[in-house]
């Protein structure tokens, strides 16, 4: 009988090389609690070495030829594609994400590094501006280029443990900015895979590190003046605490949401409503609802509500729950039992306050059943906050204006989906909705990794999407040339 080999102990990546600390911590599966791997913990001296190296190499890295950075990014993209299945299995094991969604995440990361390679080749080409539009500028020409602001601290969350690490690292390399990546403590293994692949490239030593440090060691990194740029994806509370603690640093914050799907009166055929219900059910529950643009609220016009609601309930109940390693599973566990208990408490609070439970509402360890609620009080926690779990609320409104007002009735403003066929309504939605992105004919959960992505209100500041992140990581510097004949 063949015995199962013990889980691997993973080194971290210090200034481009493998390193081990003096201790390790365990990464366990939220599905069955098994040990997925052990991870080395950087010492204080090793963290200092990584920061010092990133700071020291910043000028060299900024001057690295674009083709060198692009080649490294292309290499990582190809290697991720080659290793799709084993990386997907790793994501599923450490995160609890169903493997079919994990495969999709790897595919997205492949694209992010490819997009970054393309942007590295065309970014920073320079813009010329004539200054002889006034007499004092005669014979002068301004040339504007973008240069890195300095080394970056990238802080990634657990819910997309590969792709959101990619969204920190790839734009930094493309822009020529050194980066120290801190993956989420619950899911560090996927970020460390990126380190393995970057180590196969010719990027300068010190230009990147992947350090799986505990959250309580993050404030010191945040405060370090050698890391003038912070790119954070995570909770509203932590993100704004970071910004408040370093008001003179440049912070990009991708924070929470409670995404709304608006179904308007013209979206009324049986085929329309079947499509809307299927998309809503799928994307309120994918990743266990642990996506900041998952569908948390459905706002339906009264003329379609009674036909739409049973379709949503049926589609939610058809979601396959269970072992994330099973290719048929749609909904796996949440990242931890504590996370599932929090969702359970919020649903119980809403039901106690008068909400109707139409599906789900049951917890089993770290898993929470896909859930549909109606008549949820406006002041219930699940109405006001980001649930980050497989829970959906549905409400009825009268008309477009009321629907858009309901969607805006939130402190968050990440993305909204609007189901309509009317192009004029689409443009009105784009103007009226206080969000970073409006998706017409689909749920708010759509994201293309090259598009600008970010929120309004309490959903953060700045934008991701490779080129847009590169702009956040750099600043304009003007060169004025004198004595020219133009």
Image: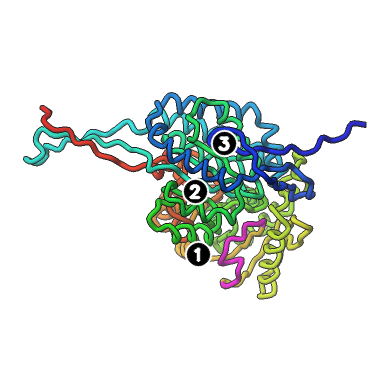
Q: CA distance from mark 3 to mark 1?
A: 31 Å
Q: Which residues are magenta?
A: 379-390
Q: CA distance from mark 1 to mark 2?
A: 18 Å
From the image, tell me which residue sits under label 3. Answer: 109
Are the residues tagged 2 and 3 within 8 Å (C-beta)? no
For disc 1, the neighbor class at 10 Å (few under 14, some 14 to 19, many from 20) is some
Give coordinates of residue 273: x percent, y percent: 61, 51
Q: Which residue is mark 1?
A: 410
Q: Are marks 1 and 2 in contact (CB under 8 Å)?
A: no
Question: Is residue 33 at least partly visible in the picture?
Answer: yes
Residue at the extreme bottom of the image, as rendered: 353
Q: Is residue 448 above or below residue 31?
A: above
The mark found on residue 439 in the picture is 2
Q: Which residue corresponds to the image point at 73% horizontal and 52% vertical from the top-left?
A: 333
Quadrant containing the N terminus in the rendered view? top right
Q: Residues within 10 Å of mark 2 (few under 14, many from 20)?
A: some
Which quarter of the figure is the C terminus placed in? top left
């Amino acid at each position: 009988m063949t015995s199962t080999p013990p889980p691997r102990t993973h080194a971290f990546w210090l200034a481009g090389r493998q390193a081990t600390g003096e201790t390790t911590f365990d990464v366990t599966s939220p599905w069955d609690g098994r040990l997925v791997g052990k991870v080395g913990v950087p010492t204080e001296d090793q963290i200092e070495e990584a920061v010092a190296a990133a700071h020291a190499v910043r000028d060299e890295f900024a001057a690295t030829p674009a083709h060198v950075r692009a080649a490294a990014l292309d290499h990582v993209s190809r290697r991720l594609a080659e290793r799709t299945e084993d990386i997907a299995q790793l994501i599923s094991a450490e995160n609890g994400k169903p493997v079919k969604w994990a495969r999709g995440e790897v595919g997205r990361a492949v694209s992010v590094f490819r997009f970054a390679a393309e942007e590295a080749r065309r970014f920073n080409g320079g813009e010329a501006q004539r200054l002889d539009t006034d007499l004092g500028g005669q014979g002068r020409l301004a040339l504007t280029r973008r240069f890195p602001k300095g080394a970056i601290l990238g802080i990634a969350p657990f819910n997309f443990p590969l792709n959101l690490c990619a969204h920190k690292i790839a734009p930094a390399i493309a822009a020529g900015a050194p980066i120290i990546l801190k993956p989420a403590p619950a899911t560090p293994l996927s970020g460390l895979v990126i380190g393995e692949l970057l180590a196969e490239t010719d990027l300068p030593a010190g230009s990147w590190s992947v350090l799986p440090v505990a959250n309580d060691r993050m404030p010191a990194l945040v405060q370090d003046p050698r890391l003038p740029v912070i790119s954070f994806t995570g909770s509203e509370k932590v993100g704004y605490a970071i910004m408040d603690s370093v008001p003179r640093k440049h912070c990009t914050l991708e924070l929470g949401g409670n995404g709304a799907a608006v179904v308007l009166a013209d979206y009324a055929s049986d085929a329309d409503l079947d499509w809307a219900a299927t998309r809503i059910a799928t994307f309120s529950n994918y990743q266990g609802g642990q996506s900041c643009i998952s569908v948390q609220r459905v706002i339906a016009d009264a003329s379609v509500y009674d036909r739409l609601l049973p379709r949503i309930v049926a589609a939610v109940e058809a979601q396959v729950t269970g072992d994330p390693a099973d290719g048929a599973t749609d909904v796996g566990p949440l990242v931890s039992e504590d996370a599932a208990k929090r969702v359970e408490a919020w649903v119980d609070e809403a039901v106690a306050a008068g909400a109707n439970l139409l599906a789900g509402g049951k917890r089993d360890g770290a898993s929470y059943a896909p859930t549909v609620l109606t008549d949820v009080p406006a002041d219930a926690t699940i109405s006001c906050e980001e649930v980050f779990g497989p829970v959906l609320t549905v409400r009825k409104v009268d008309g477009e204006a009321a629907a858009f007002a309901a969607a805006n009735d939130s402190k968050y403003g990440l993305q909204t989906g609007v189901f309509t066929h009317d192009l004029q309504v689409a443009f009105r939605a784009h103007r009226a909705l206080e969000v970073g992105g409006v998706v017409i004919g689909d749920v708010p959960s759509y994201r293309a990794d090259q598009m600008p992505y970010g929120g309004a209100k309490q959903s953060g500041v700045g934008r991701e999407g490779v080129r847009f992140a590169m702009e956040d990581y750099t600043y304009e510097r003007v060169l004025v040339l004198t004595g020219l004949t133009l």
